[in-house]
Amino acid sequence: MQKGPASPEVKAKIIAYLETVTKAKSRDVAVAIGEKKGDVDNAVKELTAEDIVEYLYITTTYICLKGKVGAPE
Amino acid sequence: MTEKKTPLLDELEKGKWPSFVTEIKRAAVRSASAAELLPLLERSYRERIGHWKHGGIVGVRGYGGGVIGRYVDVPEDYPNLAEFHTVRLLQPSGWFYNTKTLRTVCDIWEKHGSGLTNMHGSTGDIILLGCKTNEIQPIFDEFSEAGFDLGGSGSCLRTTNCCVGPGRCEHACYDTLDACYNITNEFMDELHRPMWPYKSKIKFSGCANDCTSSIARSDCSVIGTWRDTLIIDPVAVKEYAANGYPIKSQVCDKCPTSCLTYNKETQELTIVGEECSRCMHCINMMPKAIHPGKEKGATILIGGKSTIVQSAFMSWVVVPFMKLESEDDYEPFKELMRGIWEWWDENGKTRERIGETIYRLGMGKFLRETGIPPVPQMVFRPRANPYVFWNQDELDKSGTMLDGSAL
């Protein structure tokens, strides 16, 4: 994972993308927004600490906007 | 608390071994959720159906792992198990505790959870079984205050694990406890923030006895070895002989590479060092007479895993020898792992372990793109390893056909 503060632009692009999907793997987010995977991981780390994004486990780990996905049916 | 009969579970209390049923019954006196576990498990045994589902979102702020969401599919029958999440705590290397620490773990857990623990889970962590969603953050806060941190779960670096190493074992070829601690601290982001196609595990074993079963159970196995020759104590060999120990049949005849020879007349044991595969058999059989060499370190292997996308894999050698004596020696290992994870993250499909990615794309591509030099130790016999593929253009240059014959 990249060290140092994340780019605000990358964080904004991640949030904008996650608004269009229910959940996504961080690699898919990186491809979709055209950013380096390491930069996306670093931004996601900050976004989760800010309670904007959360991790979701459904056979593998996804990310999603906080509150967008509930408990498993 | 509803009292229900559990005849099937009661069978598991018979016999001389400790019983998890007995322990759950003890916990049930004080915990409503533990009390409901027994009738639920009895029902599963009777119906032969599991009633648990897991996953979803449960965690603490900023963390993607360490808590596994668990729910029953019949919450109306077992309301105290509607949420029964598992918490994983990072364990100390080698599982060394003092009693004060153990009491702290239990006190916090009894305050917020079911009181049931699994010391330790197959992952190596301290496993705390059963808490409600609203208790997760307070649990984390209290454990954090007490000096603990969450372990790994999800598509991240899972909690690293090591054998007891030099703490209690004379065979350890490197300090597994220190290596595990140091390397875990280095990769905290990778452990707590799932970012990969699937899980990745590192296990540290001090010798080829592999007490963590790393070769079968971890994506990266770090197995202690030595690169010079076994040390044979001739006086101790004679003592074994004088005590009637069958050196030839138990040691030499069972050596996988037949590199040991015993002369019964002179009571001398000799070795052809180049043939030794460092399997530990002779050392295990004659620990007072045979010892690892002096130049100790570890072999790094990649790709072990249980059945998921593909069948179970054993990990295979990528670095035959790496020194691991000091903190400086850990740096090449850390760099190696960063490169391997980056390649896997780039190439791996969702739910594909690194061994499966290498299997799908070929060891040649993996080695070329990660910059790991190919070495003979990667293959058991030339052309007998299904994970190694040769490119036709390279074979053309070498004048060799795919079946090994000359062009």
Image: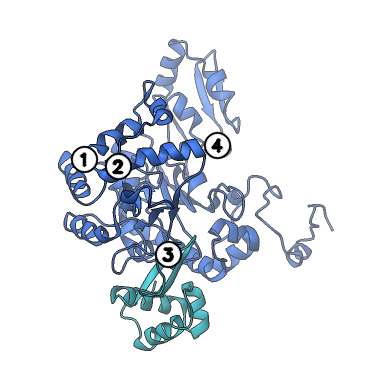
Chain colours: A cyan, B blue
Q: Earlier in the sequence, mark 2 or mark 3?
A: 2
Locate residue B238, reporting x and y percent: 44, 16
Read off the chain for label 2.
B
Q: Which residue is mark 3?
A: B335
The amino acid marked with disc number 2 is Ala
Query: Which corner quadrant of the image does residue B165 belong to?
Result: top left
**Sequence-first disc among 4 and 2:** 2
- CA separation in Å, label 4 and label 2: 53 Å
Q: Amino acid at mark 4?
A: Cys
| Residue at which label 2 appears | B34
Q: Where is residue B28 drawn, in percent x and y?
A: 26, 38
The circle drawn on residue B378 is: none
Q: Residue at x 51, y 43 (%)?
A: B49
Q: Check chain identity for marks 2 and 1: say if they share one.
A: yes
Chain of the residue on which disc 3 is drawn:
B
Q: Earlier in the sequence, mark 3 or mark 4?
A: 4
| Above or below for A67 versus B108 | below
Q: What is the C-alpha distance between the residues marked 2 and 3?
A: 45 Å
- Indicate the position of residue B219 as horizontal and vertical percent values: 49, 53
Q: Secondary structure at mark 3?
A: helix
**In the image: residue B18, left or right of residue B321:** left
Q: Could you tell me the amino acid type at mark 3?
A: Glu
Residue annotated with mark 4: B276
Q: Is residue B322 visible?
A: yes
Check whether the beta carbons of the residues at disc 2 and disc 1 lie within 8 A of each other.
yes
Q: Which residue is mark 1?
A: B30
